[in-house]
Amino acid sequence: MRTAEQSEKGCARPGGIVRTRRNGGHRAIAFGVFASLLFITPAAADIATACAGTSTFPDAVTQLESEGWTVLTRDSDLTEAQVDALAWTLMTGYLAGDDGGEDIATLLDLQRRSAPGLLARRDTDTTKSRVLTDDDGVLTIVQTRTLPGRVERICRFATTGNAAADAPVGLTIINTTEVDGAPETLAEITTVLTEETKP
């Protein structure tokens, strides 16, 4: 598991947001990413590449599938662990401090009830989303056209149990050490892209 200081680092991706330490340079980022890649599974390594380094939503999903992720369909049966993990992916904003005055347990219960609905989402002209799984966790990818010529793609990852999984390089790691029942690995990345020009 990476420390909070280490999680401030990110990897530079075309069209993506780059997070670096204040005193870090491109060489330090490149070395840190390379060193981290030596110790993680391919699926974890490629979340940021697919989410931040692909120009279209279908390309992002295809790349994730090629790395072993499975897209869940509308009629997929979710295990209890998958529902739990999906609920935690919906909690990242609350864990960052925007809880609206509610306790985490109440918010998590609401998100658990919402989690199966993620599979029922239909693509529209402005929003596309998928839920994917692998052996260790669940991943949501949502892309929204927020302004003409601008799209925002958000990927969130959570382990399907409380055991730690390899921390995805390039994603912001959410600190869950003080939260009862939270997965040990919860992460997200937001990428701003120019609007897609191909389907």
Image (tube, helix red, strand yellow):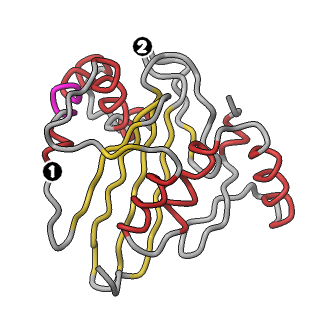
In this rendering, position of residue 152 left or right of residue 3: left
Residue for badge 1: 121
Our reading of the magenta stretch's main secondary structure is helix
- Does residue 99 lie above or below 63 as drawn? above
Residue 54 is left or right of residue 74, and the answer is right
Foreground pick, 34 / 43: 43
Picture residue at 44% right of the left edge, 44% below the top: 69
Q: Secondary structure at mark 1?
A: loop
Q: Nearer the viewer, residue 39 or 1?
A: 39
Specify the quadrant of the image occupied by residue 98.
top left
Instruction: Identify residue type, mark 2.
Output: Gly
Q: Quadrant of the N terminus?
A: top right
**Residue 140 placement, left or right of 170:** left
Q: Residue at x 27, y 84 (%)?
A: 148
How crowded pointer 1 is (Cα within 10 Å; few <14, some 14-19, many 20+) is rated as some
Q: Position of residue 164 (x, y in %)?
A: 58, 22
Magenta segment: 111-115
Residue 3 at x, y percent in the picture: 70, 33
Q: Residue at x 63, y 45 (%)?
A: 42
Question: Disc 2 on helix, strand or loop?
Answer: loop
Type of residue at label 1? Arg
Residue matched to label 2:
181
Residue 175 placement (x, y as % from top left) = 55, 30
Q: Is residue 195 above or below residue 181?
A: below
Residue at 65% over, 47% down: 169
Q: Which callout, 1 or 2, points to the residue nearer the camera?
A: 1
